[in-house]
Amino acid sequence: MTGALQAWDRHIHAFVALSEVPAGTGPLSGLTVAVKDIIDVAGLPTRNGSETCAGTPPATRDALVVQRLRAAGARILGKTTTTEYAFTDPTPCRNPHDLTRSPGGSSSGSGAAVGAGIADIALGTQTAGSLIRPAAYCGAVGFKPTAGLLPLDGVTPLARSFDTVGIIAGDVNLALRAFEVMSPSGLKAEPRDLVAICGLWDTDAEVHPDWQEALAGAKEALAGLTSQLTWRELPADVETLVAAHRTVMCAEAYASHRALLRDDKASLLGPKFLAGLEAGRAVSEADLSGARQVLAEARQAFWNTMSGTELILTLPVPDGAPLLGDTTGFQDWLTPWTVFGGPLICLPWGHDDLARPQSIMLAAHPGQDLFLLSVVAHLERHAPPIPAPRLPS
């Protein structure tokens, strides 16, 4: 354990296990990677943030995404704190910018480790808003690739219809470098006439004034990179999408983890994950089929509406990291994006009046991952800085 990691982690509790395996050589030599504790790392147990996995033996092999990072020379630091089975029960992890606030979830430790500067890159997953949100709250870049692009071998499932491995990193270039070694070969960023929109979902969520200013500033900066940028309300019924998504997510979580409802395991589960499994058990085949149809139709309708629009600028959340409590933060604005399946990236954009990191987010059509990363790399040059968090005394 390095001195900086040890000094920070006694305050933020980002890590649950550390690796002693030395780094190799390759394009990521010299970079450190932290791995969410639902993703296998050889020699370390995968405990899924749950007391039900307390006796789990060490994994015998790396998850495929970890294999690829290790083969590229990255040093795997260890496993980071996750909410239980990547659901929503809060963790002991703390936000490095303010120890009284949540780092977000479910990739809590991954966001906190990168936000504190003790890992260059971290792996997380997103099933609703579980990767972008902690990146945004902790002042890091968060990149969720196109659904299905990165392999899920060696990753504990929550809901395979949505589970996506993603990257939290100190800057866009680091996210790009990690993505390139983990993704299939042959991906290209095709040049295109950049038509973009800027907008928000029509919901009752109250947007913090400082976050409204951040979006306006990002829109002004993005205008210089586009051939056309207009404002429009994002076209989707968020409430209906969130409800249908939860039906499918809970049903699939129950299908994967029903054995945990046995008496000897259920008593060890956190209240929110237990309630999610119980909700999933109650979903009928007809209700599950109907929810999947709602999501499929909404996905097709959204991208049909976005035909001719290459890039969407928005906010990942309406406000900064919440105080510690029974929530890992607001995710309803992220759930539709996860359902729609395209790549997302959040970019730190200054801080608000409470010194909380702010973030803007950009989305692109499925498969346009490298295009999105290339545009945001240019936009990053215009981002207002976020002061580095100070190690508590």
Image (spheres, grey):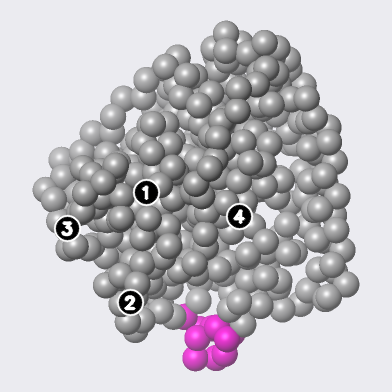
Direction left: furthest residue: 3
Mark yes or no: residue 189 visible: yes
User: Which numbered disc covers residue 148?
Assistant: 4
Mark 2 neighbour density, 10 Å: few (under 14) some (14–19) many (20 or more): few
Question: Who is closer to the viewer here, 69 or 335?
Answer: 69
Mark 3 neighbour density, 10 Å: few (under 14) some (14–19) many (20 or more): few
- Residue 290 placement: quadrant: bottom right
User: Which numbered disc covers residue 122?
Assistant: 1
In the displayed structure image, the side of residue 211 where residue 94 appears, left or right: left
Q: Secondary structure at mark 3?
A: loop
* Contact flag, marks 1 and 3 (Cβ < 8 Å): no
Q: Earlier in the sequence, mark 3 or mark 4?
A: 3
User: Which numbered disc covers residue 60?
Assistant: 2
Residue under numbered circle 3:
22
Residue 215 image position (x, y, % from top left):
58, 20
- Which span is picked out in magenta? 259-268
In the displayed structure image, the side of residue 15 where residue 202 appears, left or right: right
The Cα atoms of the two marked residues, 2 and 3, are separated by 17 Å
Residue type for callout 4: Gly
Q: Secondary structure at mark 1?
A: strand
